[in-house]
Image (cartoon, rainbow, N blue to C red):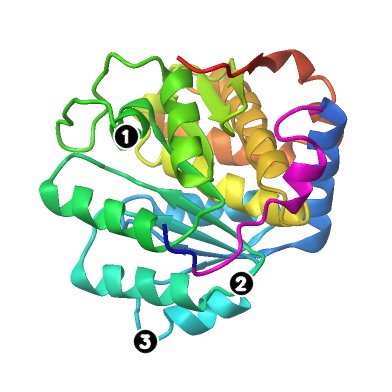
């Protein structure tokens, strides 16, 4: 695999991978993110871009959204983190993605959201080439995208998730070992793995699958909080999952449908305090990965 940049893994290595997480770490991560206000550059799909930008603002970050290849390298060099989302790909956006990845520099968390992997041969080839040519600190997708990326046979209908035979934890671990990235597979349960351990996160709301871009928002929050945590991909990713699931539960209690849920979700992301995360330790379970 080519490496255009060093993966921001030093902090995760010091913690022995995914071990040693606590609610206190998540609280500290959110607090530091709001203090630092990291600049996060997203090259993303036009369906979810505004939702992602508003979510980043709600947790204290400064979002930049551009698919223009004439400026992507320059913006990426200045940003604290980078989100690459392959939804609605165009020739221009792909050129912007490659420019941003080439210009991002060393030590930044860079997240790949392989939206619609397997939906078309073009998109499959694009995502395969990005993973081959560049190193990502995070790869986050729905269960189908991650299992297909990990080598499971299956198919996608458009960009919708299709169940595959491989257990999510197995696919997450396999893909992490293949790429060296921290991998997250989202669904009713979210799985986060580094090839050694797998974390499973519960909670959320049944409205989440009914709101376009909710998965893309998680990718944005992972990058934002990883930058806020001092370029610690594991702390940022786990905090993002916990934060979004808590916000979804708060929004669910107030919403009357998917539309009001979306706005209530943004409000909840804005209002949740670091202290609120101290109560969320039981949301996570940890398993050692011993192979299939």
Find disc 1 in the rendering and name its residue: 145
C-alpha span from label 3 to label 1:
30 Å
Residue 156 occupies quadrant: top left
- Residue 79's disc number: 2
Q: Is residue 273 left or right of residue 143?
A: right
The magenta stretch spans which residues? 4-21
Find disc 3 in the rendering and name its residue: 70
Q: Is residue 134 left or right of residue 151?
A: right
C-alpha span from label 2 to label 3:
16 Å
User: Does label 1 or label 2 sit earlier along the sequence?
Assistant: 2
User: Height in image: 93 above or below 241?
Assistant: below
Judge whether residue 62 can be spotted in this image.
yes
- Give the structural element (helix, strand or loop) at label 2: loop
User: Height in image: 128 above or below 100?
Assistant: above
- Give the structural element (helix, strand or loop) at label 3: loop
For disc 3, the neighbor class at 10 Å (few under 14, some 14 to 19, many from 20) is few
Judge whether residue 256 can be spotted in this image.
no
- Give the foreground label among 1 and 2: 1
């Amino acid at each position: 695999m080519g490496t255009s940049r060093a993966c921001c893994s030093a902090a995760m290595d010091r913690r022995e991978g995914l071990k040693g997480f606590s609610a206190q770490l998540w609280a500290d991560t959110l607090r530091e993110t709001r203090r630092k206000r990291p600049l996060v550059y997203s090259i993303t799909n036009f369906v979810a871009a505004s939702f992602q930008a508003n979510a980043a603002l709600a947790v204290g970050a400064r979002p930049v959204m551009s698919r223009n290849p004439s400026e992507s390298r320059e913006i990426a060099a200045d940003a604290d983190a980078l989100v690459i989302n392959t939804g609605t790909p165009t020739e221009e956006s792909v050129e912007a993605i490659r420019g941003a990845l080439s210009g991002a520099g060393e030590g930044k968390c860079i997240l790949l959201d392989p939206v619609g992997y397997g939906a078309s041969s073009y998109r499959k080839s694009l995502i395969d080439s990005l993973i081959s040519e560049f190193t990502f600190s995070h790869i986050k997708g729905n269960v189908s995208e991650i299992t297909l990326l990990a080598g499971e046979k299956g198919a996608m209908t458009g960009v919708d998730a299709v169940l595959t035979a491989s257990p999510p934890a197995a696919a997450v671990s396999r893909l992490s070992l293949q790429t060296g990235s921290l991998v997250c597979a989202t669904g009713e349960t979210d799985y986060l793995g580094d090839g050694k351990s797998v974390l499973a996160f519960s909670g959320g709301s049944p409205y989440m699958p009914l709101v376009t871009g909710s998965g893309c928002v998680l990718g944005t929050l992972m990058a934002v909080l990883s930058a806020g945590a001092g370029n610690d991909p594991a702390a940022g990713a786990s905090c993002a999952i916990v934060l979004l699931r808590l916000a979804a539960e708060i929004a669910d209690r107030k919403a009357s449908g998917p539309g009001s849920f979306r706005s209530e979700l943004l409000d909840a992301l804005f209002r949740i305090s670091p202290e609120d995360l101290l109560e969320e330790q039981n949301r996570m379970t940890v398993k050692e990965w011993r192979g299939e």
